[in-house]
Amino acid sequence: MDHHLLTALFERWSQQTNTFHLPVGEMSITLQDVSMILGIQIDGPSFVGHPVVGSGRRWLSWPDCCDDLLGQHPDPYVLYHDPFNSRQRSLRWARDSYIDLSEMDFWRHVRAYILFLLGCHLLPDTSGSEIHLQYLPLMEDIAIFRTYFLGGAVLAHLYRELSEATRPK
């Protein structure tokens, strides 16, 4: 990773226009760039979940959602940096929990792997080791998940993170 290049790009990022201001003009990252570079969907239903966890909803708690869609959930004291914030999952747990693959658990492993990819590569946060569970219910039906407008979510996330990184502290 070229830190000098990243620093130079951060210095030239405009939060108002979501563009880089370069000596030769403005440059932006577009949905077409996202599609060409990452090979992900840039059309289809929005990659937005509905409230499905909580009293009177599909799952009572995030551990219940994990049990149903991933087959397990870790002990809160192992899992959370903040035991009272049960909406975040350790990516290390997702990677280490699925060593032996059986046919019966195939789709659970697919979901865990997609969750890992989202947290590490497509929608990373500054921790580098956590992913918000709001994305997990979207993977309940993988056939539908494949059609989501993931490129828009990735681009919006990139714009937000660039703006956060360049905001004066």
Image (spheres, grey):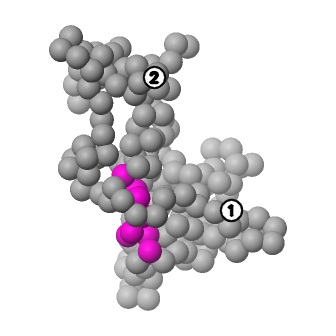
Q: Quadrant of the C terminus?
A: top right
Density class for disc 2 (Cα within 10 Å; few <14, some 14-19, many ≥20) is some
Q: Position of residue 68 (x, y in %)?
A: 60, 77
Q: Position of residue 73 (x, y in %)?
A: 60, 67
Helix, strand or loop under label 1: loop
> Residue most toward the bottom?
104
Q: Nearer the viewer, mark 1 or mark 2?
A: 2
Q: Quadrant of the N terminus?
A: top left
Q: Nearer the viewer, residue 61 or 83?
A: 61
Return the residue at label 2: 15
Residue 150 appears in which quarter of the rendering?
A: bottom left
Amino acid type for the residue under numbered disc 2: Gln
The residue sitting at 51% across, 51% down in the picture is 131
Tell me if residue 14 is in the magenta stretch: no
**In this picture, which residue range is highlighted in magenta?**
144-151
Horizontal side of 1 relative to 82 (left or right) equals left
The residue sitting at 43% across, 69% down in the picture is 145
Q: Is residue 166 visible?
A: yes
Q: Is residue 111 visible?
A: no
Residue 81 appears in which quarter of the rendering?
A: top right
Q: Position of residue 18 (x, y in %)?
A: 40, 27
Q: Nearer the viewer, residue 27 or 60?
A: 27
Amino acid type for the residue under numbered disc 1: Pro
The residue sitting at 40% across, 19% down in the picture is 14
Return the residue at label 1: 51
Tell me if residue 148 is in the magenta stretch: yes
The residue sitting at 24% across, 43% down in the picture is 33
Is 104 placed above or below 119 here? below
